[in-house]
Amino acid sequence: MNILVTGGAGYIGSHVCVELLMLGYKVIVIDNLSNSYINALHGVNKIVNIKLNFDLKKHTNFTFVKVDIREIEHVEKIFSSQKIDAVIHLAGLKSVRESVENPEKYYLNNVNGSINLINVMKKFKCKSIVFSSSATVYGNAKETPINESAQVMPTNPYGENKRDIEKELKNLFDLDKTWRIAILRFFNPIGVHKSGFIGENPCDTPNNLMPYILKVASGDLEILNIFGDDYDTHDGTGVRDYIHVMDLVSGHIMALKVLIKKSQIMTVNLGTGIGYSVLDVVKAFEKVSKQKVSFKVLGRRDGDVATSYSDPAFAKQALNWKAKYNLEEMCHDSWNYYLKK
């Protein structure tokens, strides 16, 4: 099968590419490199070279094209030159803070870009898509753990973008039941590939917790800013469901395999079912790395919620999937990635 991975040079995308290649799929990556580096794909090449003994630069199983999904004519060229069997859609801007500051930019990139992609898929009769949504669509969920039937009520433009794209996909299926659609609402990915050759490496100041911790532990940044310590949680800091990126990857692969079997639409949470606070993560990282992480507490950020963690029961039922890595393993692998950089 030929799989198009949008945002394939990003944090999650590069890990997805490794697993697809290891399983023998042909992978076509498109990415505009706005918040990722081509070096991530060099890391993918290193891993595949070691494991499978072939160079992606010379192998027909891998293609990279620098493309923005908003440029519909360029996306069409890729579909016309390649037989695309399915899409794993990861491309998009992902900072909650930035989405609050610049909602129009986020809508144009994330929602309009996704609509362009869907329209091209329709034109070329490619009807299988795994969409990486987000637990942010739940907003301030009334109950935790959160299952897929919880009310969708995002509290920030980023979450609204994900909700809007989900709606487009659901409308698509309502009009044409031959589509195969998986909407994966994942929680908070951290950790990296065990090799340490690829990881989370944002182009600008980190918005996600683990790369921020890494920069402080390594001395690149002086201090970790923690936004709010007055939430109704066990230590006052926000609680999230942190999931190892390789568990997230396996969820995408299992969704792809399930879609191949029949036309359907499914919405699935990907999380561990365990909530950890910001300070829990800091302490776990300090334990495995033996590094001190200095921090200071600032006020809450707009759009943040106090507690968000998943009920992963449906993922087990629908995908035969369950997270297997614990928090210390996530922290260990992240630190290993930094040490190998």
Image (cartoon, rainbow, N blue to C red):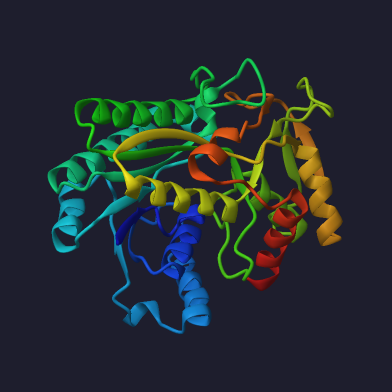
The residue lying toward the viewer, choosing from 7 and 225, is: 7
Q: Is residue 90 visible?
A: no
Specify whether 244 is left or right of 290: left
Q: Give the quadrant of the N terminus.
A: bottom left
> Front-most of 283 and 330?
330
Task: Work out whether residue 50 can be spotted.
Answer: yes
Q: Residue at x 19, y 62 (%)?
A: 82
Residue 289 rendering spot, x and y as whole percentages:
81, 61
The extreme bottom residue here reads: 53
Residue at the image point whose x is 72% and y is 50% from the top? 213
Is residue 191 toward the left or the right of residue 64 in the image? right
Q: Quadrant of residue 320?
A: top right
Q: Residue at x 60, y 19 (%)?
A: 140
Which residue is at a point 51% across and 48% down the rendered structure image?
251
Q: Quadrant of the C terminus?
A: bottom right
Q: Is residue 64 above or below residue 171?
A: below
Quarter of image, res 229: top right
